[in-house]
Image (tube, rainbow, N blue to C red):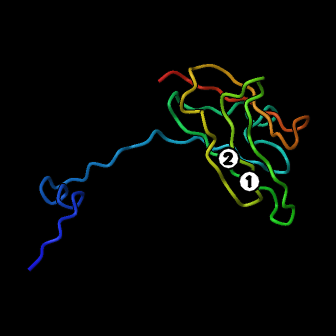
């Protein structure tokens, strides 16, 4: 007879609880009608706690098939996302390493018209 022991299940069986890492909550910035929500003209900046995550959701109309992304508006970007099509989402890389402060971001596909502000608050 063979016994297969899966370490995670054994931990639950021995302790009665599962040790599951908890990630900080993620803030979400959406693209709606080729604009960031929240954005400069819609309820202020996107806010995320220091060490937190930011997700980009492209909520443009499915028929539009516009591609969008988020890139820190600096010579050397500290955060960025891949380009996503309508109905897709992606994590914005680098946000979890930002110190508290205010950062401007843009869509690299539409840099003149799609701008936003990210506010990272203290831990």
Q: Which residue is disc 1 drawn over?
A: 84
* Above or below, 72 relative to 109: above
For the residue pair 45 and 95, the one nearer the viewer reads as 95
The residue at 60%/40% (across/down) is 54
Q: Position of residue 53 (x, y in %)?
A: 55, 39
Q: Which of the 4 quarters of the picture holds residue 65? A: bottom right
| Left or right, 96 with reference to 28 | left
Q: Which residue is disc 2 drawn over?
A: 56
Secondary structure under tag 2 reads strand
For the residue pair 71 and 118, the one nearer the viewer reads as 71
| Mark positioned earlier in the residue sequence (2 or 1) | 2
Mark nearest the camera among 2 and 1 is 1
The residue at 50%/30% (across/down) is 51
What is the residue that sits farthest to the left in this orientation?
Answer: 1
Secondary structure under tag 1 reads loop
What is the residue that sits farthest to the front in this orientation?
Answer: 2
| Left or right, 8 with reference to 84 | left
Q: Position of residue 93 (x, y in %)?
A: 61, 39
Q: Position of residue 44 (x, y in %)?
A: 73, 30
The residue at 88%/41% (across/down) is 110
For the residue pair 80 and 28, the one nearer the viewer reads as 80
| On-image quarter of the N terminus | bottom left
Q: Which of the 4 quarters of the picture holds residue 106? A: top right
Spatial distance from mark 2 to mark 1, Cα to Cα?
8 Å
What is the residue that sits farthest to the right in this orientation?
Answer: 112
Q: Position of residue 95 (x, y in %)?
A: 59, 33
CB atoms at circles 2 and 1 under 8 Å apart?
A: yes
Q: Which of the 4 quarters of the picture holds residue 59? A: bottom right
* Above or below, 3 relative to 97: below
């Amino acid at each position: 007879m063979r016994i297969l022991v899966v370490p995670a299940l054994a931990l639950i069986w021995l302790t009665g609880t599962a040790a599951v890492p908890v990630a900080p909550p993620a803030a979400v910035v959406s693209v709606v009608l080729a604009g960031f929500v929240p954005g400069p003209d819609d309820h202020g900046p996107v806010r995320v706690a220091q060490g937190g995550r930011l997700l980009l959701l492209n909520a443009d109309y499915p028929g539009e098939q516009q591609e969008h992304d988020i890139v820190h508006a600096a010579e050397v970007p500290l955060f960025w996302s891949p380009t996503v099509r309508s109905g897709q989402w992606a994590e914005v890389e680098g946000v979890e390493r930002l110190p508290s402060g205010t950062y401007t971001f843009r869509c690299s596909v539409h840099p003149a018209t799609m701008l936003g502000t990210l506010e990272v608050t203290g831990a």
